[in-house]
Image (spheres, helix red, strand yellow):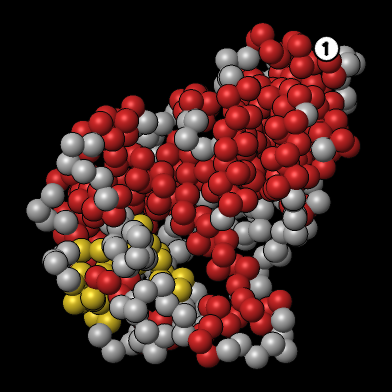
Amino acid sequence: MTKTVALISVLTLSVSTFAKPNYGLLSSDLYPSSQEDQAFVSKFFDIVEAHKTQDPLLEGKGPSIREYSLDKIKFAFITNVTDDKVNLVFFNWKLPTFQGLEIQKALSDIYGSTVYILKGVNKKSIASQGEDRSQLTSFSYMLGANTMEKQIKKDNPTFQVPPQMLDWKPHPDYMDRSHPLRQTLDGNTLVMLSPSKELFFKQTGMTGQMRPYFEQMLTSQGGFYNSIMGMMVHEMFHVKEGEDQVNGFAKDRKINEDRKLIVEQLKSDANLRSLMATYVRIVFSIGDSSKNNSPTATELEQLADLRSVVTELKTKYSDTWKFIWNYEYTEGFAEYVSAYSMIQVGITSFDQQIDLQKSDTGNNFAYRSGTMGGLYLVKRLSQMPFSSNEDHSESLWEIVLRFTNTKPSAKSIDEITSKYSTISSVDGEDEVKRVIDYLISTVME
């Protein structure tokens, strides 16, 4: 073989080895009778593909999580749904195989690594939604048999875990701890996904009359499929975060805010409400400023004002401050990785995500201010500057302020709150009311 022919052969092999899988073909094999489901799954795998080259944590660390790359996370798509059975098609399964788990050769050839299928699974055995937690929906996950035991013994190594705790199930028909799937998972988690609208709407218990109005609302947020995909990427982050903590890869965050106290203070203290509203307005104003290619004088001023408000909140209302930055990590970063993943594959742009976060009043502002912080780190710092325990001692926006060398504002707190009451496009008072309602609901729980 000549050198030229040999080189062409090597290049051909490289292209065939590293070429992007045909996700359209993969999705049509998974859901042959639904073009909508095929489109959803194909786009989801575009996100998987994007994570291969750049996970949303920029190959670094996030708060209490080591990495978030969907091409390394175990997940299964729910297929062939009947009245009582489903098939589970497994991707990224690197654990031992077990009886009943079969290789799906056609999908393996397309995906580029082994894909497995588990046929005839009882729907109720993997269901955990609805009033009795026995309904299947578009997103669920299966915990390993030893997950709870590992979690308890991580915190209390000598504690003898009672059998009834080990055998706990969300409902009687749930998959037994002795099942090979749960045994093989051990302290791991299997995420289970379905694009099915029908499964989703059955779980909500929504009447036929209400469904068109709900679908119209989803359309205003990008449509059902974009909404459900964003939710899946968000929740899969939580699953990976929890799995990391169970297996001792990440530290637990110890932020114990007194929610009852926060509610009482927010109801009675006008100064606290004003500070919180100002915090929201400034963070979202910085989000708007980050749409520019580089920081402007206005943005630098906004950062300085934010430092003063953060200092005031930390000093005078420590529990409220703990709630804000705890939620900016726990929910805000899950929302951030979802937003960034949607940007990666062109479902939304960076600017559109900033606007979506501002308008998504279904979530309290800390979800969205955390997302803004993650997007700011990407846009301005191009890194996730977390070390092993920084996320337990500093808030997300304090990290931003430290890395941007921001000094406190020269203005008084009263001047700052007055300034942002008129220039922000976000209704700070309404955001505070939503936090109060949210906290009341969690205190009751």
Quarter location, residue 220: top left
User: Which residue is identified by label 1?
Assistant: 415
Quarter location, residue 251: bottom right
Q: Is residue 401 above or below residue 250?
A: above
Name the residue rendered at 56%, 55% in the picture.
445
Residue 38, position as x, y percentages in the image:
20, 49
Name the residue rendered at 71%, 14% in the picture.
420
Q: Amino acid at mark 1?
A: Glu
Q: Is residue 401 above or below residue 177?
A: above
In the foreground, 210 or 305? 210
Return the residue found at the far left. Answer: 33
Which secondary structure lies at badge 1?
helix
Residue 145, position as x, y percentages in the image:
47, 83
Quarter location, residue 426: top right
For mark 1, does the 10 Å Cα neighbourhood hold few (<14), some (14 to 19), or many (20 or more) residues?
few
Name the residue rendered at 30%, 50% in the picture.
204
Q: Specify whether 3 is left or right of 292.
A: left
Residue 405, position as x, y percentages in the image:
84, 31
